[in-house]
Amino acid sequence: MERITIFDTTLRDGEQAPGFSMREAEKVRLARKLDALGVDVMEAGFPIASEDDFNSVRAVAREVRRPIVAALARSMDADIDRAAQALEGAARPRIHTFIATSDLHLAHKLRMSRAECLDQAAGAIRRARRYVNDVEFSAEDATRSDPDFLVAVVEAVIDAGATTVNLPDTVGYATPDEIVRFFQTIRARVRGSDRVVFSAHCHNDLGLAVANSLAALEGGCRQLECTVNGIGERAGNASLEEIVMTLRVRPDKLPFTTGIVTKELFSSSQLLGQITGENVQSNKAIVGRNAFAHEAGIHQDGILKDRRTYEIMRPEDVGVPETTFVLGKHSGRHALMNRCSAIRIEPTRLELDELYKRVIALADRKKIVRDHDLLELWGQMKRAASRAQVPAAFAFRDEPHPADEAGYGHGV
Ligand code: KIV
Ligand code: ZN
């Protein structure tokens, strides 16, 4: 098993997404959490972008001592000087400088020739190396760049002293098979490729960012750039938690380890949501509210018998407190009894039947029946029974629910 580098860019690419910008104190708070999470590199910001970003990078660089702290800079003198200044207090500083290499970006955005681009890239690396030994180069829009030109740029930045070469799929256009071939080809063709770490930075425009990042490992990358909850420009970056847990769950396919403390994944995701006010969708892999929740009777029954039937990882391994059983119209009696025990209700067999009917009726109206609803239904039953002065054991009219008919609700 080979250990790869996790480069977290939640504080930079992540916060570039609309609605995700963070102030200095918030960045420092999240940086502490990323440290506890075990990221190897954290990109703290883009110091030339604003005074606030400069201050944030400086504050993070002073606060966090174990991981490498990176600052982003275009391949321009002023950017590199500003990044270096922001990193002055860092224990392990990295300057990350980039320039676009695709003809599309060169012609229409930078209005620059290939020769100018190559010179600027190499010059930026030389300037950054005057300040720090750890310099990363990114060829923006690398996957849509002409391979011959990309090889020339990568050779030039290696000669100039780059230590990591990142080849981003900036607009999330590539497919996993292309990514494997892309990295294999560039690494094979570049003179001096064994002197640097190759890195992937995949965007999620087609929902392929994690698949592409994992494919990049097969292509020879040993650093992956990603963000908590997959936040980032447009549809976001590769999700850190999804990459890490795929490696953890499928070492047979992907024999790589990371330094991530997986028990910190859920709380990191929650903290980011708290700070930005943007929570992940409920079905988000690993950290979404439903990632370890089961409603269907067949699934709840399976989980109660052996959790491996419907869970490929343990919730506690990613810091989720426990598997949750949600009561809904697909739930069976077995699951209801389980919830009752959890909230210390002890219905008799007949009471359970009545309660079950009420739960299903309520689920039809409000989709999810939570513990407080269950308590309310139980209270109503008890009150009705005491008004009628009969025991709470209601007459059981046997009208089985489809979940029961399938055989999943019985056995209580
Ligand atoms: O997506 C991208 O190309 C980037 C670079 C600046 C690394 O974020
Ligand atoms: Zn990006």
Image (cartoon, rainbow, N blue to C red):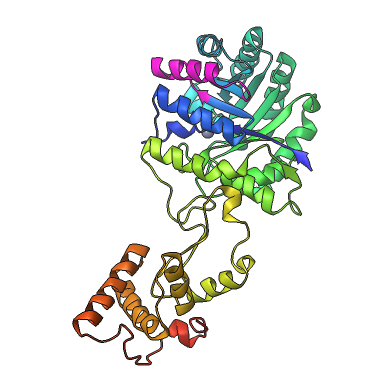
Q: Is residue 66 magenta?
A: yes
Q: Position of residue 47 (x, y in %)?
A: 47, 17
Image quarter of the N terminus: top right
| Camera-nearest residue between 283 and 412 | 412
Total numbered labels placed on residues in the image: 0
Task: Answer above or below: position of 324 versus 17.
Answer: below
| Residue 102 seen in the current view | no
Q: Position of residue 278 (x, y in %)?
A: 38, 42
Task: Answer above or below: position of 378 versus 225.
Answer: below
At horizontal 33% and vertical 72% (from top left) the residue drawn is 363
Task: Answer above or below: position of 351 versus 50.
Answer: below
Which portion, as a residue range, is magenta?
Answer: 44-67
Drawn side of residue 81 relative to residue 156, left or right: left
| Residue 184 seen in the current view | yes
Q: Is residue 12 magenta?
A: no
At horizontal 41% and vertical 22% (from top left) the residue drawn is 24
